[in-house]
Amino acid sequence: MANSIENNSPIPVSNIDGAELQTVAVRAGHHRTHELEHSEAIFPTSSFVFNSAAEAAARFSGESAGNIYSRFTNPTVQIFEERIAAMEGGERAVATASGMAAILSTCIALLKQGDHVVCSRSVFGTTNVFFEKYMGKFGVETTFVDLIDVDQWREAIGSNTKLLFLETPSNPLCEIADIALLAELAHQHDALLVVDNCFCTPALQRPLLLGADIVVHSATKYLDGQGRCVGGVVVGRKEHMDEVFGFLRSAGPTMSPFNAWVFLKGLETLCLRMKAHSESAQVIANWLSGKDAVESVFYTGLETHPQHALAKKQQSGFGGVLSFRIKGGREEAWKFIDGVQFLSITANLGDTKTTITHPATTTHGRLSDEGKARSGITENLIRISVGLESVDDIKRDLQLGFSASGLE
Ligand SMILES: Cc1ncc(COP(=O)(O)O)c(C=O)c1O
């Protein structure tokens, strides 16, 4: 019987075999302690004790499994890892201190000097800098290509290419990569496809099931969902995750138990939140599309989006992030942003609170002018991460932006 308790032993674990994603998001990975707590316990301890010197030696040598030290073994973090691995359909997950630490750990663990990476040009600005400047410094060269141009990916691959990296949908222009197609291409060349699944989360898209090898997340975004903690995670096959774990153990870009607990609480509502974010974003995208003061709207849920059909095929929803080009330039965009009353002017996304940002001078501000031009990051581009406030209130606030811009 599920959840049976016999003299407190064995400790009950929810039986969720064959459960749907929403159930997995709420329950997977929870191994109760002898206190039989209902909500997952937080273990704010740096180390764990052993019953004897021999037990300590066995743990350190790997002969026996168990906790040692929270840089690499912590029960709260492990619940988060098991849950997100189950949600993404991966064999193992490794939690990290941030989304960038997830990307760093993946690359350091799986690449070596002389290897080559092909990366989408439409990635988070810091990811771009990470590959170009820091991986380059250690002899791993990166070629940047157009996310949606498969020929460019094909042509960029060389005999030393080990990894293809992309975000889909992209930030902030919501372009879509065909994950299955690029996975096939990567595998033809013995390379790995790594997908940053930050925008969709497993609630809307499961890249591993489409053929990708590794998924990385900035848990800071929708996995938390309420803008509280910075964290990240890598998910994939055991052979690769064991390497990532080895790097984490040796280098220490570790998630704290408290943050892991916050992310666990976030995962429990993820499916519901992503549905609500998607519904409101669709309403806002439709509304913006009808505005004379708007040049173009970028949202995969719009039938006019050039990859709407692909988005419909590989995603189960269109997500909460959209962007649009206002008529004019930086001046109009900044006036618009300064004109809103309650939307938060902040670079974060994936929050219950709607956020608004000017990518050209914030998230993508470190790109060169040429880089911005190639990535479509124009001065009149505004990104909105649609939150969970009333959609009518969000519209009313955006209308204040239009008035302030002088365009309406
Ligand atoms: C798509 C994407 N990936 C990775 C990151 C980096 O995550 P973190 O800020 O948690 O390091 C971000 C941050 O905004 C992001 O938007």
Image (cartoon, rainbow, N blue to C red):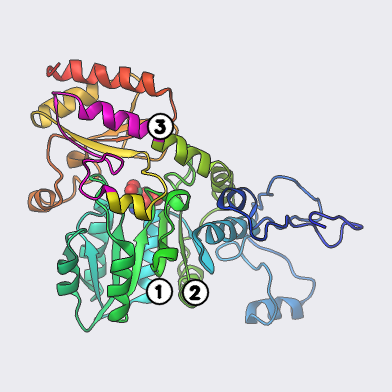
Rendering coords of residue 347 (x, y %): 31, 38
Question: Along the polypeptide, which appears first: circle 1 or circle 2?
Answer: 1
Separation of marks 1 and 2 at Cα, in angstroms: 8 Å
The amino acid type, in three-letter code, at marker 3 is: Gly
For the residues bearing labels 3 and 2, Cβ distance under 8 angstroms: no
Q: Is residue 266 visible?
A: yes
Please say whether residue 281 is one of the residues in the magenta stretch.
yes
Separation of marks 1 and 3 at Cα, in angstroms: 35 Å
Question: Along the polypeptide, which appears first: circle 3 or circle 2?
Answer: 2
Pointer 1 local density, CA inside 10 Å: few below 14, some 14–19, many at least 20 = some
- Residue tagged 3: 387
Of the pair 401 and 99, the residue shown nearer to us: 401
The amino acid type, in three-letter code, at marker 1 is: Ala
For the residues bearing labels 1 and 2, Cβ distance under 8 angstroms: yes
Question: Along the polypeptide, which appears first: circle 1 or circle 3?
Answer: 1
Residue under the point 28% across and 32% down: 285
Camera-side mark, 3 or 2:
3
- The circle drawn on residue 246 is 2
Q: Give the range drawn in magenta.
A: 279-308
The amino acid type, in three-letter code, at marker 2 is: Gly
Position of the C terminus, as image quadrant, is: top left
Rendering coords of residue 329 (x, y %): 9, 31
- Residue tagged 1: 109
Residue 141 lies left or right of residue 12; in this view the side is left
Residue 155 lies left or right of residue 138; in this view the side is left
Residue 351 lies left or right of residue 162; in this view the side is right
Mark 1 residue element: helix
Position of the N terminus, as image quadrant, is: bottom right
Of the pair 59 and 367, the residue shown nearer to us: 367
Rendering coords of residue 330 (x, y %): 11, 31
